[in-house]
Image (cartoon, grey):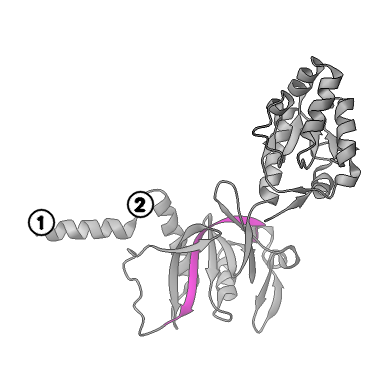
Amino acid sequence: MINLFVEELYIEQKDKLTLELISGREGLSRKITVPDINRPGLALAGYFDYFAFERIQVLGRTELSFLQGLGKDHVRSIFRKLMEWDVCCVIITQGLEPPEELLLAVEEKNVPVFTSQMPTTKLIAELTIYLEDKLAPETSLHGTLVDVYGIGVLILGKSGIGKSECALDLVERGHRLVADDLVDIKRTAERILMGSGPELIRHHMEIRGLGIINIKNLFGIGAIRDRKRVELVTTIEEWDEKKEYDRLGLDELTYSILGIDLPRIIIPVRPGRNLSIIIEVAAMNQRLKKSGHHTAREFNKTLISWMQND
């Protein structure tokens, strides 16, 4: 399970979300485990049968106005009941003053309380985007990721097969490098796979016999990008005379990454084959498929129709 410490959230989003720590500094080591946000209106009304305690609790003007109509003893008991759950932190929006009863309740449990000057809905939107990215499932693959005609092409293959050389040729032809050698991939909430390179080796490439080169410095800022959605997997392998390769394009191969199946093509390597041009055409063909045009299927349908009418 991916965890995020409250302290990390505070450090990274303090300025953007105008966060100010009011109480519970000892609880900054608490973990945030889900990207969802909770406005505990029903809990404040006394309904705890379903209380999303694992989420960040956000209190806005609506919640605080409701509490003002209750007696102090009642409010105190509500917050004590709320803090019996393992709440990670509380954020009060619009620069509103935290209720004294809340501060007394969190003091016993060391639950961090923040205030923010942002409107409630805007803070929730910004915070959700941040949490979804930080808590997204991720993995790393040995390969190269290139943006080819707007399609994120992940190039896989055994070491020394020519992945980096192929990517270098694509960059020279005007496409953009995202990551070489090691590709970090995250799955977002929309079931989209986003690929990027580790910060230490980002924009660099290893070419055997040449060494490490910096693509950004050599080709300019237009030759690189920091992250890209992965939409197509190409596997480069040595040509095997005994193996039957797809010649029509009717076979729908897939490659699973973090539970998401991506279209996959296998490109056999032999002298005289221009891999970069093949990958360019594969990327353009993938764009056609996304727009509803499957050339192989259309050709096969036309051929069958011609045979039936012959």
Classify residue 303 as left or right of residue 141: left
Classify residue 267 as left or right of residue 93: left
The kind of secondary structure element at disc 2 is loop
Closest to the observer, 97 or 151: 97
Classify residue 41 as left or right of residue 150: right
* Circle 1: residue type: Asn
Where is residue 75 shown, x and y percent of the image?
82, 23
In the image, residue 87 sits, relative to residue 175, either above or below, namely above
Query: Was residue 233 drawn as part of the magenta stretch in this picture?
Result: yes
Q: Name the residue under label 1.
A: 309
The kind of secondary structure element at disc 1 is helix
Task: Tell me the residue at 40%/53% (across/down).
Answer: 288
* Circle 2: residue type: His
Task: Tell me the residue at 64%/34% (across/down).
Answer: 50
Query: Was residue 290 drawn as part of the magenta stretch in this picture?
Result: no
Where is residue 36 shown, x and y percent of the image?
66, 40
Q: Which of marks 1 and 2 is nearer the N terminus?
A: 2
Q: Provide the major secondary structure of the magenta segment.
A: strand
The residue stretch that appears in magenta: 224-239
Asked whether the residues under the numbered discs 1 and 2 touch, taking CB atoms below 8 Å apart as contact, a structural biologist would say no
Residue 73 visible somewhere in the drawing? yes
Q: Which mark is residue 118?
A: none
Q: Residue 293 carries which label?
A: 2
Q: Quick one: label 1, few (<14), some, or many (20+) residues within 10 Å?
A: few
Q: If the image is split into quadrants, where does the C terminus sit?
A: bottom left
Residue 19 visible somewhere in the drawing? no
